[in-house]
Structures are given as structure tokens and as C-alpha cells.
Image (cartoon, grey):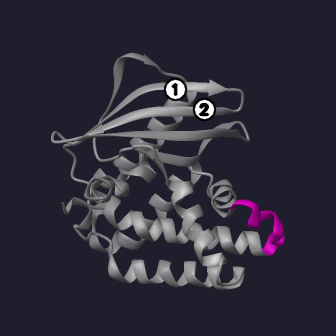
Amino acid sequence: MQRYKTFWAAILIGGLVGGGEFGAMAAVGPATEAVRKTVDEVIRILEDPEWKKPEKKEERRKLLEQTIAQRFNFLEMSRRALGAEWNKRTPEEQKDFAASFQTLLANTYLGRIETYSGGEKVQYLKEIVDGEYADVYTKLDNGKMTVDIMYKMEMASGDWRVYDVVVEGTGLVQNYREQFKRILRKDSFAELTKQLREKAEHVKAAVPAGADSARSR
């Protein structure tokens, strides 16, 4: 479990914790370039002296959220994480759930993303495309251990967007789907959405931006 705790903070930004490089035999295409484009933009924001100013903290956080949201399809992630329950909900309920889920993910990981200090590397290995779907394979290396990270992507509105991230065989969507199923076995859908909102607020308060939790081992 400690291995996963070390790296889950990085999965939403394609290994932003280090500069990217392509493997010697990598089959690189548009989906991989889409991931790397977002990684580069996030790093640019984090390294920009102007955005490092304390008074810019909240504005920078919003910019990071917007940048990541352009690459990650949080609505599709929400649909897949909720499973069959999704089709039972009204459009308004779906929208509310997706917004709450996105906020939870953002609050969980962005505080850790903002501890970026470099020194780790992400290697883009290959991509496998099947029609409108693609899997982008990467490897994250911090000098002590390596972690395989795969981005599952879908072509949407002319662009490749991430709908799941698989770390060492464990998918983000599947992980949350199991949690949601357990909650829904004893609580209502409204209660699940409420718990997401409350958890998001708790995480935001517990992990302030700039905390060094991402590097704790």
C-alpha cells in the first residue's frame, strides 16, 4: 500500500513530477502527445515564478484545475465509476454527482501536485489505439522504484481525453466504483453525493496547497 500512496498523487497529471522522455522503441502517437501536452503545461505553471507568489495561490490552483479538466473527462469517469446506477439517475443528479466527484479528485491530488520539485522521470512507452479508444503506457521512475501507469483515453469532440488511470494494474475508476457500491448497498444515492461533497471539503482542509504530503514515504 505504501508504494501506491507514494505515486497516486501523480496520476492525474501524467507523471508531472519529472521531465518526459520517449522509450527507444516507443510507438508514439496523438494520444501520447495529448498527455504530454497537458503535463508540459502543468509543469510550466508550477515553475513560473509569477505563479509561485503567495497571493497567486488560489488563482494558480484554479488554473491547474482548468488545465487538467481539459484533458480529463470527469463526466465519463463519473459515469464509469458509478456503473449501472448512473442510468437510474436524472440528468441533474448526474451533473451534481460528477461535479462533486471532480471536486473530490481535485482536492485530493492538487495539494500534492503543488509540491512538485522535479527529480523524477516519466517515460512514454507506447500507445495502442482501437478506433476511438487508446491506451497510453508510461513508466514513472524516482530513482528508487518504478511504477507502470496507463492512461485509458477516448476521442471526444476531436481530442483525446482521459477517462481512467491504471497504476500497477489498479484502476482509479474501479477503485472508486467498489467504494461507491459499498456505500449504495446501505445508503441512498443522495447520501453518496453528500458524502462526496463532505469528503472533498475535509480533504481540502486537511491537505492545504503547498503541503509536503506528496513526498512523504
Q: Quick one: quadrant of the N terminus?
A: bottom left
Q: For the magenta stretch, what is the residue range?
A: 83-92
* Residue 52 % position (x, y): 28, 62
Tell me which label, 2 or 1, sits earlier in the chain: 1
* Residue 131 % position (x, y): 71, 27
Q: Secondary structure at mark 1?
A: strand
Front-most of residues 127 and 86: 86
Q: Horizontal placement of 5 versus 194: left or right?
A: left
Q: Horizontal placement of 114 versus 13: left or right?
A: left
Q: Are marks 2 and 1 in contact (CB under 8 Å)?
A: yes
Residue 174 against residue 98 in the figure, above or below: above
Q: Horizontal placement of 14 versus 143: left or right?
A: right
Query: Tag on residue 134?
Result: 2
Residue 140 sits in quarter: top left
Q: Secondary structure at mark 2?
A: strand
Residue 149 sits in quarter: top left
Residue 204 against residue 88 in the figure, above or below: below
Q: Quick one: quadrant of the C terminus?
A: bottom left
Q: Residues within 10 Å of mark 1 (few under 14, many from 20)?
A: many
Residue 24 against residue 178 in the figure, above or below: above
Residue beneath the point at 67% across and 72% down: 97
Residue beneath the point at 52% across and 85% down: 198
